[in-house]
Image: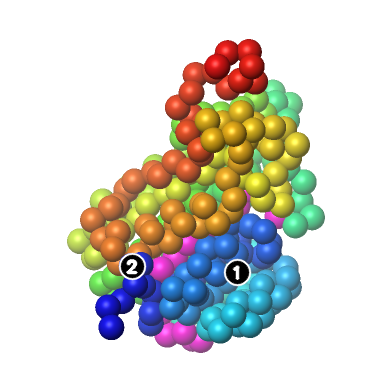
Amino acid sequence: MKKQFADFTDQICLVTGAGSDRGIGFATAKLLGERGAKVAIAATTDRIYTRAEELQALGIDAKGYIADLMDRAQVKSMVQAVLKDFGRIDVLVNNAGMTQVGVPEDFSGFLNMTYESWDDSINRNLNIPFNVTKEVLPGMIQQQYGRIVNVSSVTGPVVSNPGESSYSAAKSGVVGMSRSLAIEFGADHITVNCVLPGWIASDSQTEAEAAGGLNTPLQRSADVGEVANGIVFLASREASYITGEALVIDGGNTLQEYKGPQELYY
């Protein structure tokens, strides 16, 4: 029987930042599992075990791992545990970043931002994908196959907002890092791509962000599953000649010059 498009049967996929049941990471892990993958999911709290149980209830071979991915020793231990349990990692989805349970976001303006806040944002949003990728890449090189998809944002690489200089710098850095890795490891049959979400109706979305979603050309925020669709395609065998790309998933928001209420312009 002919395999389905984007079939992940017998592939091992590691998805970070999958603790929220309404987040991009969990939606991605679920979609990968539904398409045949064995899935390792990671987060900072024990709710990741609940997510793994939910995947298992769907017939997906899944296991959860707790790790603070800003701590490189914990990253190393987590990746080693995944390799021990599953044997290899074929696909890495670096979704962790932006927010952490119990840690409020800091939207201070640049002059009022503390050095600690800047460092934390860079660590959370740029160093995490660096840390995990550095541990996973050697195995992909050895097996001469890999797919890495980094979740960046339109904020930084394409647009920005007041009070988001550190986040913008970090997410821009993720795109730059991905492009460099795409060149460096293409000969090893490893592709490295990014998705750049816009307004997303996730648990962490603010009231202002939800209002922004209503003023996109599609007049709504994205469902997390719509971002997961893009991630899963880039992670598939079929996306074999796509590398170093930054796929914008924002409902056309960054296309439009005017972003206010439609009744005042359109």
Q: Is residue 245 above or below residue 134?
A: above
- Say left or right for 227 vs 69: left
Q: Percent from the top left, x then y, of residue 14? A: 49, 70
Magenta region includes residue 89: yes
Question: Please, what is the three-letter code of the amino acid marked with disc 2?
Answer: Phe
Helix, strand or loop for disc 1: strand
Of callouts 1 and 2, the N-terminal one: 2
Q: From the image, tell me which residue sits under label 1.
A: 42
> Residue at the location (25% across, 72% down)?
144
Count residues near mark 1 (Cα–Cα under 10 Å), then give few for <14, some for 14-19, many for 20+. Answer: many
In the rendered view of the protein, which quadrant contains the N terminus?
bottom left
- Say left or right for 146 vs 71: left
Q: From the image, tell me which residue sits under label 2.
A: 5
Q: Percent from the top left, x then y, of residue 160? A: 56, 29
Tell us which disc is closer to us: 1 or 2: 2
In the rendered view of the protein, which quadrant contains the C terminus?
top right
Helix, strand or loop for disc 2: loop
**Looking at this view, is 41 or 142 the one in front?**
41
From mark 1 to mark 2, how far is it between C-alphas?
A: 26 Å
- Say left or right for 182 vs 76: left
